[in-house]
Image (tube, coloured by chain):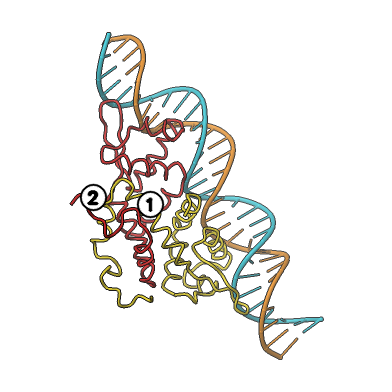
Chain colours: A yellow, B red, C orange, D cyan
DNA sequence: TCCATATTTCAATAATCCTAGAATCATTGG
DNA sequence: CCAATGATTCTAGGATTATTGAAATATGGA
């Protein structure tokens, strides 16, 4: 991930509605959610959600696909992973201990429990 | 890390000069760098670097301490680690495979090579 | 005390971002 | 083809953020 994309991704995640959208899409899985459903969940107008979705798409964190009249948005897991890695590398650059910090604390999916990971 | 702090941190990292400052401070280590030295490295005015340093401090990613006439800024490693963890948890929420992704690719300090980690 | 250094604060401007409503586009069904 | 639905684009506004130069603050040394 180059710096430009990282800057754009951080910018995309620095807004409440957009962060909430990313969270919802990550949980929603590969099928994603329709723009209207996202707007409803977030409690914002169609116009507004469209603005934020475009911003997120521009940064590469999400993608869209049309299904009939609806447009479904889904999280780009690879981009999210790249962003985590970018951040971690910058941290680690001077202090590998930070990575240790991240891994030692109770992560969301522990490094040892890989039973539910799709290979 | 609560959502507000995450939003603020992402915002802080979404600006070129600020991202460069964080990188420099992480590499510089716990002693950090004086504001003037940072301004020089970044090629920006004292006024401008002061503005960005304040923004970074407000988000909790860096701290300052005065040493004689200079004010030294240093990275808050714990906050950076918290942010990585926040991002990773949001990713992992729906897809533990992402964490796998992050760990499998060649990280800056591989998960297996912990020889240089200060305990 | 007076001066130089290091940095911040203030004030003004420029630039960018967010929100909202009206208009427009794409798709489906009658 | 026409109407309805789902979503985007356009336009304008208000709000926040970024940059700049001048003035102010803090520290240390002659």
Q: Find residue A78 and name its label.
A: none
Front residue of this view, candidates A33 and A74: A74
Residue B102 image-quadrant placement: bottom left
Instruction: Judge the density around disc 2: few (<14), some (14-19), many (≥20) Cα neighbours within 10 Å.
Output: few
How many tags in the picture? 2
Pointer 2: what residue? Answer: B116
Q: Could you tell whether A28 is left or right of C26 in the image? A: left
Q: Judge whether B33 appears above or below A89 on screen.
A: above
Question: What's the residue at 51%, 65% (across, down)?
Answer: A62
Letter of the chain that mark 2 sits on in the rendering = B
Question: What's the residue at 54%, 62% (across, down)?
Answer: A57
Q: Quadrant of the N terminus of chain B?
A: bottom left
Q: Could you tell whether C9 is left or right of B111 in the image? A: right
Letter of the chain that mark 1 sits on in the rendering = B
Q: Judge whether B85 appears above or below B53 on screen.
A: below
Q: Horizontal and vertical percent for residue A84?
A: 39, 58
The mark nearer the N terminus, 1 or 2, is 1
Front residue of this view, candidates B65 and C8: B65
Pointer 1: what residue? Answer: B9
Q: Which of labels 1 and 2 is toward the front?
A: 2
Residue C1 image-quadrant placement: top left
Kindly indicate whether the residues beneath marks 1 and 2 are on one polypeptide chain. Answer: yes
Furthest-left residue in this view: B119
């Amino acid at each position: 991930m180059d710096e430009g994309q990282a800057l754009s991704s951080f910018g995309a995640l620095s807004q409440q509605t957009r962060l909430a959208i990313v969270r919802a899409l990550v949980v929603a899985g590969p099928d994603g959610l329709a723009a209207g459903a996202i707007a409803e969940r977030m409690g914002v107008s169609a116009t507004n959600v469209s603005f934020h979705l475009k911003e997120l798409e521009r940064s590469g964190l999400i993608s869209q696909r049309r299904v009939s009249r609806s447009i479904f948005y889904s999280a780009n897991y690879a981009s999210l992973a790249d962003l985590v890695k970018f951040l971690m590398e910058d941290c680690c650059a001077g202090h590998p201990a930070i990575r240790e910090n991240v891994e030692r604390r109770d992560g969301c999916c522990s490094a040892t429990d890989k039973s539910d990971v799709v290979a």
